Amino acid sequence: MRYRHLLTVFTCLSAVLSCATISLAHFGCVIPSDDIVTQEDPRKIQVALKFLHPLEGQYMELARPEQFGVQHEGNRTDLRAALTSFIGKGGDQQKGATFWQAEYTIKRPGDYTFYMEPVPYWEPAEDTFIVHYTKVCVNALGKEEGWDSPVGLETEIVPFTRPYGLWTGNVFTGQVLVKGKPAAFTEVEIEYLSESAVNTKEITVPGDPFVTQTLKTDAKGMFSYAMPWAGWWGFAALNTADRTIKKDGVDKPVEIGAVYWVFATPIP
């Protein structure tokens, strides 16, 4: 298992978290124990599924996902039966929240795209349901093929930068799709997963806008962002679905998010 998963970050965001008016960004989270499996690495990896505010480390309840699977060489495999639930015990930020984990054994070379479709999450503060279609890519055994293939989710980010083997400071470029078509001028929220930090440097923010970075796609649904810290970065492209879900007999809007996770490796 690569060293980065053994290290912890201390997040100083008390000023942000104490402000009740701040709207914290939600992110679906699919994080593997390793993003590049070499010939020397164990073939069995763990994949964690969570729903949280990444930089703050604040977990929300994640029900058993509607879909969880992996795509390899164009073939999709259902992995829901492999999921095991866990209850957070790591302090107030995650205490009592359900998250999930699955083990997966790499058998052949190539790119493995893990994906999740959660049960719609009701967010009363926004008066809306949230569904984040989340993906991450694991490269295995030297064959770099498949990372740029769509999975076919209602909305998804298709990487235009190979999403592994990236240094801190590299630029990640992706295209947002909704029902297979480019999503022009879509808002993309970007956050750092504090629990993935590869050092113990204290993270502080000089103001609320620094917690969640925000940009928009261009007319072709494209966006780019340079990752300044080593660790996992989440990209969430947000749109409103053309359907509603009833809550207490009233139709409520559905926010659909295309989420992609990318690891930035520290420069030696």
Image (spheres, rainbow, N blue to C red):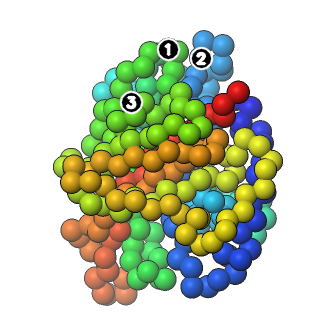
N-terminal of the pair, mark 1 or mark 2, is: 2
Quarter where residue 41 is shown: top right
Q: CA gap, disc 3 to disc 1? A: 13 Å
Few, some or many residues within 10 Å of mark 3 (<14, 14–19, 20+): many
| Label drawn at residue 82 | none
Along the line of sight, which residue is nearer the eye, 161 or 147?
Answer: 161
Q: Circle 3 is placed at which residue position?
A: 147
Q: Are marks 3 and 1 in contact (CB under 8 Å)?
A: no
Quick check: 6 above or below 99? above
| Label drawn at residue 38 | 2
Q: Are marks 1 and 2 in contact (CB under 8 Å)?
A: yes
Which element carries disc 1, helix, strand or loop? loop
User: What's the residue type where badge 2 is placed?
Assistant: Thr
- Identified at 45% across, 69% down, the residue is 121
User: What's the residue type where badge 3 is placed?
Assistant: Trp
Quick check: 125 above or below 194? below
Please state the horizontal and vertical placement of residue 108, each as a whole percent of the image.
47, 16
Along the line of sight, which residue is nearer the eye, 41 or 75?
Answer: 41
Please state the horizontal and vertical placement of residue 16, each as a whole percent of the image.
66, 75
Quarter where residue 19 is shown: bottom right
